[in-house]
Amino acid sequence: MMLRFLKRLWFIIAHPATHLSLGFLTMGGFVMGIIFWGGFNTALEVTNTEAFCTSCHEMRNNVYEELKTTIHYTNRSGVRATCPDCHVPHSWPRKIARKMQASKEVWGKIFGTIDTREKFLNKRLELAQHEWARLEANDSLECRNCHSMESMDITRQSKRASEAHERFLFTGEKTCINCHKGIAHQLPDMHGQDMFGASSHGTPPMTTGQGGSAEVEAYIRKTAD
């Protein structure tokens, strides 16, 4: 019975209609296209929300709890950066590419790659390095969606921040993520790791587990010599 139904369905699909006009078929295809696109875009946007990102306990109980203690979550201006703001590009082609790349996280969810706090901490440095490399490769695109050099008034910044921005950001020598690791989540154990990425040209490794301010200042002094 099922085989007969499938054969009949294939026959209908594979052969031209004898009783339906070309206009009807064209309009039907147009309507079905709208329905498909609407459904696809709706599903895409659902997966692009903070609620969806934190629906898994791996994210909700670890990095999301850390985000809630930072200025990106609560601040005097009332502007909140959600998970997709920082981890998903805004333009449609880049967004689709990122979604395809992130689909492998479903595999990790199924097999419990970081389903306990201990597993998460053991993988934390590796996960962070993947995201840092992605942001360095796209010139901190997600950061620049909100923070632009053209709108930056360095005269209202601290001396250290203004010097760093003028010397590294404005010249294109560095990008945001090189110096702002740990801005929204706790750093992994960075002992012996290069704080400033692959382009730091001999920068001394980190000497502390949670920090980086001292290394930033040391790097500014080193490059000024």
Image (cartoon, rainbow, N blue to C red):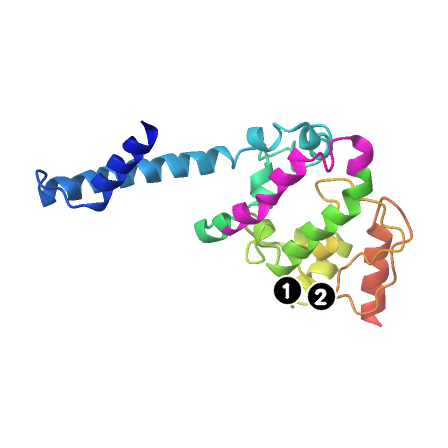
Q: Which residue extends farthest bottom?
A: 225
Task: Measuring from the top left, give residue 42's x and y in whole percent.
Answer: 41, 34
Q: Which residue, given by chain and number where applicable, does mark 1 sit on?
A: 170
Name the kind of residue labelled 2 in the image: Arg
Mark 2 neighbour class, 10 Å CA radius: few under 14, some 14 to 19, many 20 or more: some
Q: Are marks 1 and 2 in contact (CB under 8 Å)?
A: yes
Residue in view at x 81 percent, y 44 percent: 188
| Left or right: 174 in relation to 220 | left
Residue 69 position, x and y percent, is 73, 31
Q: Horizontally, is 161 left or right of 29 in the view?
A: right
Residue drawn at (79%, 31%), measured in percent from left and top?
117
Which is more toward the observer, 146 or 96? 96
Q: Secondary structure at mark 1?
A: loop
Task: Check disc 2 and report the residue beneath it.
Answer: 167
Asked whether 187 or 180 is in front, the reply is 187
The percent position of residue 9, horizontal first and vertical second, equals: 26, 36
Q: Which residues are magenta?
A: 97-120
How would you classify the magenta stretch by its main secondary structure?
helix
Task: Name the quarter where the N terminus is drawn.
Answer: top left
